[in-house]
Image (cartoon, helix red, strand yellow):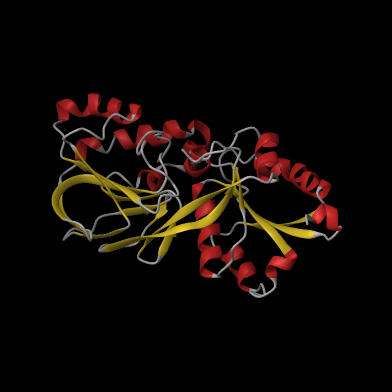
């Protein structure tokens, strides 16, 4: 029986980043409260201070009875905000439906599910009833929703000025990333899976749970977020003269068949290198190598407007 029919008031946790994207989300806080109040639900807002605020709140919940009091968690912000929320949920053993209000720069995780960018429509999706199961990636014990990236160019989002990101959006990632290509050098790495071992020289690589990264919509066009697999793409050394055309192929999602790309799916991976390579998880600083990857199959339930994850 729903909260509306039973008359019992349920609580919804709203974890939000007031500075994500253009910062307009906080101007719509009352719209969210009003929409959920119509369903006889109380919204508990938690302002983002990294992972700490949401983690501490969830840690205090009674793990035996919290579902009697709470019915949902909402994460409002970019992929980094959602990452903090998911890490806090899993580390505290919390299993509640997750609504997403994309308010970041790239919003790659929300893009996978087709969540609208219009504030009223995204609120309706979050407050709706349809859910899609989603895997969660694991890298050295840290959880990621969308992508783990390794190499000399994957710290682009960390180098991009926040003001530039909010002003130019995804274009800021592109402009910053292009400046990296003049300094790239191939690095030796070793990839070990249950099925095979690869010894490669790479510029950079991504381990994808979703399909897009940094606003590039077709980085992993064949990814399925609930297939229990991660999509691994390693970008080998590319002659400078071929970089512009290859860049276009990546934008179009036509790069997987290129000889410059190693692509495979796996549910386990160990990445090793003698180099101390920068890593990035969902747009935030990642763990140091060596990295051990695995998958939590269908760990999340994401509020979605879609009838299929394909």
**Residue 307 placement (x, y as % from top left):** 57, 38
In the picture provided, is 59 more to the left or to the right than 147?
right
Residue 41 sits in which quadrant?
bottom right
Name the residue located 64 percent from the left edge and 32 percent from the top edge.
118
Image height check: is 6 above or below 121?
A: below
Image height check: is 92 above or below 100?
A: below
Q: Residue furthest right?
A: 7
The foreground one among 75 and 253 is 253
| Numbered disc total | 0
Name the residue located 32 percent from the left edge and 54 percent from the top edge.
279
**Residue 283 placement (x, y as % from top left):** 43, 49
In the picture provided, is 232 more to the left or to the right than 43?
left
The foreground one among 209 and 285 is 209
Q: Quadrant of the N terminus?
A: bottom right
**Residue 298 placement (x, y as % from top left):** 48, 56
Residue 204 sits in which quadrant?
top left
Image height check: is 251 above or below 99?
A: above
The foreground one among 66 and 237 is 66
In the picture provided, is 32 more to the left or to the right than 279?
right
**Residue 101 placement (x, y as % from top left):** 62, 44
């Amino acid at each position: 029986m729903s909260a509306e029919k039973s008359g019992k008031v349920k609580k919804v946790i709203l974890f939000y980043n007031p500075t994500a994207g253009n910062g307009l989300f906080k101007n719509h806080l009352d719209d969210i409260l009003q929409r959920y109040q119509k369903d006889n639900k109380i919204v508990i807002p938690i302002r983002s201070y990294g992972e700490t605020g949401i983690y501490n709140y969830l840690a205090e919940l009674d793990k035996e009875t919290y579902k009697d009091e709470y019915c949902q968690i909402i994460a409002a912000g970019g992929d980094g905000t959602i990452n903090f929320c998911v890490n806090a949920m899993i580390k505290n053993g919390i299993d509640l439906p997750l609504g997403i209000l994309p308010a970041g720069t790239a919003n790659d995780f929300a893009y996978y599910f087709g969540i609208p960018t219009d504030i009223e429509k995204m609120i309706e999706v979050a407050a709706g009833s349809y859910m899609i199961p989603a895997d969660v990636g694991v890298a050295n014990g840290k959880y990621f929703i969308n992508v783990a990236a390794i190499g000399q160019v994957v710290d682009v989002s960390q180098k991009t000025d926040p003001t530039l990101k909010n002003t130019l959006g995804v274009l800021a990632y592109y402009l910053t990333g292009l400046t990296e290509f003049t300094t790239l050098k191939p690095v030796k790495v070793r990839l070990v899976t249950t099925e095979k071992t690869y010894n490669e020289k790479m510029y950079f690589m991504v381990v994808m749970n979703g399909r897009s990264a940094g606003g590039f919509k077709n980085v992993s066009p064949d990814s399925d977020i609930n297939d229990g697999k991660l999509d691994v793409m390693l970008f080998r050394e590319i002659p400078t003269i071929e970089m512009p055309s290859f860049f276009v192929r990546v934008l179009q999602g036509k790069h997987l068949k290129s000889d410059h790309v190693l692509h495979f799916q796996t549910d386990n991976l160990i990445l090793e290198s003698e180099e101390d390579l920068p890593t990035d998880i969902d747009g935030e600083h990642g763990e140091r190598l060596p990295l051990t990857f695995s998958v939590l199959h269908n760990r999340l339930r994401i509020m979605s407007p879609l009838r299929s994850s394909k």
